[in-house]
Image: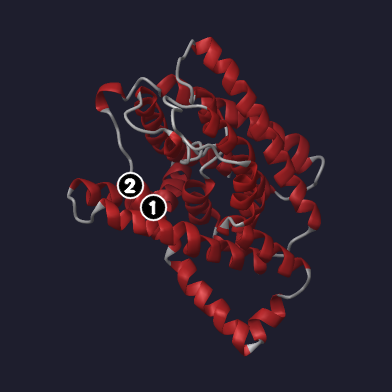
Amino acid sequence: MNDIITIALRAFPVIALITTGVVLEKSAFISADAVTGMKKLIMNLALPCLLFLILLDADLRPDYLWGSVAVFITCLLAFSLGFLFKKIWKSSNAFFPAVYSSFVNGVIGYPLFISTFGAEHLYRLAILDIGNLLFIFIVLATFLDKVGCNQTGRKRISLKEQVKNVVTSPFLISMFLGILISLLGGRTFLHTNPATAALVTTAGMLAEITLPLILLVIGYELHFDLKQLLVPLPAVLLRIGMMLLFAYLLNTFVIDRLLGLDRLFQMAVYTMFICPPSFIIPVFIEGDCSDKSFIMNFLSLNVILSIVTFIILMTVLL
């Protein structure tokens, strides 16, 4: 009992800030436009700064990237199973397979991991997240662009645009720069040279606002259709169970036996795999689409159950 209370207290700031976001939305304290601006700040500036600094100061090894490859392959497998589940469920929802792939790691996994293990160890989760992000940009976005309630008159994403999205992603740019400079030994220069040290300090100030803003935005955008809330519950529970199984297998056969990485890498895998699917899924659902209610309820319910699962899982594993 003491263990679960300890883990719950570590996760309490995460829960409290998400709840605050819910209150901000219900009370109309801030507008939806303000939250949209916060999201742009987070995704394009603050979070990339956080990832860059964490990876820059981490003691990295090239073989860590094999963990990213394993995550990418696992995402492909889970996505393939999504089509099987759609058939078993006899679902007409075109987006159904998408909810069994990818992880919204940056906005759920990072805060939970930091609250439990500390920011200095986040690089493990960030490295694994590269495989997840590449899957989202290359595979998931392509799938979502090809399905929908109404494709009439819709401009499809070209291969050129997809490549551009990957190479210009602030997430991936900041990650690869942090990894590259760290592996090349440029960390000392950046911290000691007056000009680059000033830039690093500025990035650090931006990084500090990242997690609180993320959690407030999550709470603000948690939307439930109460009449349909329990409809996606079996599908959410199936995803969580499947992902926990995949995490166990990945940790046992790849992270531990094949790569010989430490236990915190295993905790990073579990943290990632309990996260909900990527929040880009509803972005591709245009207009008053009947599929959207299920997807939004799935994501919102998955956020809550992910936090509960994390607390229980960490209590058992730690």
The x and y percentages for residue 185 are: 77, 73
Image quarter of residue 245 = top right
Q: Is residue 240 visible?
A: no
Residue under label 2, please give it.
Answer: 219
Q: Is residue 267 left or right of residue 27?
A: right
Q: Quadrant for residue 224, please give it.
A: top left
Where disc 2 sits, the SS reads helix
Q: Position of residue 261 (x, y in %)?
A: 75, 49
Q: Which mark is residue 14?
A: none
**Residue type at tag 2:** Gly
Considering only vertical position in the picture, is 143 above or below 119?
above
Cα distance between the residues tagged 1 and 2: 6 Å
Proximity of marks 1 and 2: CB atoms separated by less than 8 Å: yes
The amino acid on which the numbered mark 1 sits, given as a three-letter code, is: Leu
Q: Quadrant of residue 317?
A: top right
Residue at point 71%, 35% (across, down): 73
